[in-house]
Image: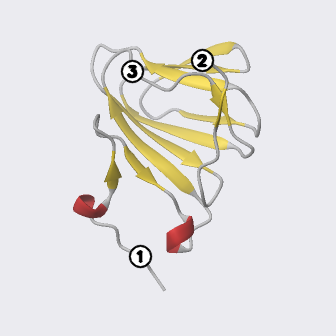
Amino acid sequence: MYSLIRPDEQQRSRRGTVTFEGEPHGSDVSMFLVNNEPGEGPDLHRHPYSETWIVRSGNVRMTADGVDIDAGPGDIVVVTPLTPHKFKNLGPGRLDIICIHASPRMIQESLED
């Protein structure tokens, strides 16, 4: 069995981020395909599974367990399960990053109001 999800069938936010949950497609991973503006990014949160980021272009500041990590094109960053984390696009241009969730569905606990 296989699934092919064409761009016009993908779940996309108003800002353009694609959300893919693997469960309906028989996949053990889920992901966000993020392409955002400077200053944008998720607030502090955590997951009961690991998350892996692949920075394709742009500059990002990730905060993981209270430590700031600056990453750029080609960098891969991984956080372990339950590690509080967030990221923001540092600019000057757009950030293109793949956020891989080691789970067939997204499970997220917000840690900021």
In this picture the colour scheme is secondary structure
Q: Label 1 amino acid?
A: Ser
Q: Quadrant of the C terminus?
A: top right
> Label 1's element?
loop
User: Dot 1, how many residues are within 10 Å of its Cα: few (below 14), some (14-19), or many (20+)?
Assistant: few
Instruction: Say which label, 1 or 2, has the lower sequence index.
Output: 1
Secondary element under disc 2, as helix, strand or loop, is loop
Measured in 3D between alpha carbons, the distance from the residue under mark 1 to the one under mark 2, in whole angstroms, is: 37 Å
Counting from the top left corner in percent of width and height, residue 92 is at 29, 13
Please tell me whether residue 43 is drawn above or below residue 20 in the rendered image: above
Q: Residue furthest bottom?
A: 1
- Residue 53: x %, y % from top left: 54, 38
Q: Percent position (x, y) of residue 85?
A: 64, 25
**Picture residue at 35% right of the left edge, 41% below the top:** 17
Q: Which is more N-terminal, label 1 or label 3? A: 1
| Rendered image quadrant of residue 105 | bottom right
Closer-to-camera residue (46/68): 46
Residue 113 image label: 2
- Amino acid at circle 3: Glu
Looking at the rendering, which quadrant does residue 57 occupy?
top left
Q: Residue at x 51, y 32 (%)?
A: 75
Q: Earlier in the sequence, mark 3 or mark 2?
A: 3
Please report the residue visible at 69 percent of the width from the left and 14 percent of the height from the top: 67
Residue pushed farthest left? 8
Answer with left or right where residue 77 lies relative to residue 38: right
Residue hosting label 3: 40
Number of numbered tags placed on the structure image: 3
| Mark 2 residue type | Asp
> What residue did someone put label 1 on?
3
